[in-house]
């Protein structure tokens, strides 16, 4: 996958593994580590997009996970909005 972020017509967002800084569930004992393949998330499971306490662009999920990424806020916002509108979009 050559793109950092990609939205699909089905409302999914693909996030390339190399741009993920952290994937965690801060209020739980277990953590999660991402290795190798892109993360695929359903846009309807994203509560909001913002910056975390470290200043990283982060998707805050309904299940309590936070996906922090090394991308610009406007790139993540554009892919988020395209996924919500069922539009395919790639950010390189």
Image (spheres, grey):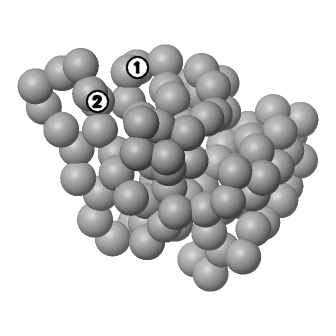
Quarter of the picture containing the N terminus is bottom right
Tell me the residue at 28%/65% (across/down): 35
Tell me: residue 47, above or below residue 1.
above
Pointer 2 local density, CA inside 10 Å: few below 14, some 14–19, many at least 20: some
Q: Which residue is mark 2?
A: 25
Q: Who comes first in sequence, dot 1 or dot 2?
A: 2
Q: Which residue is mark 1?
A: 63
Name the spot of residue 5 as percent of width and height, x first: 65, 61
Name the spot of residue 15 as percent of width and height, x first: 55, 58
> Is disc 1 in contact with disc 2, using a CB cutoff of under 8 Å?
yes
Toward the viewer: 7 or 23?
23
16 lies left or right of 22: right
Tell me: residue 68, above or below residue 65.
below
| Farthest-out residue, bottom | 2
Name the spot of residue 53 as percent of width and height, x first: 42, 36
Q: Secondary structure at mark 2?
A: loop
Q: Secondary structure at mark 1?
A: loop
What label does residue 26 carry, if any?
none
Q: Residue 43 occupies which quadrant of the picture?
A: top right
Tell me the residue at 26%/27% (across/down): 26
Q: Residue 83 occupies which quadrant of the picture?
A: top right
| Farthest-out residue, left | 29
63 lies left or right of 4: left
**In 3D space, how far apart are the residues under numbered discs 1 and 2 (Cα atoms)?**
8 Å
């Amino acid at each position: 996958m050559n793109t950092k972020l990609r939205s699909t017509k089905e409302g999914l967002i693909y996030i390339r593994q190399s741009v993920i800084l952290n994937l965690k569930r801060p209020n739980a004992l277990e953590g999660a580590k991402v290795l190798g393949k892109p993360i695929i998330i359903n846009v309807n499971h994203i509560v909001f997009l913002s910056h975390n306490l470290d200043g990283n662009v982060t998707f805050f999920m309904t299940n309590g996970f936070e996906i922090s990424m090394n991308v610009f806020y406007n790139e993540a916002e554009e892919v988020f909005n395209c996924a919500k509108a069922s539009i395919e979009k790639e950010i390189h």
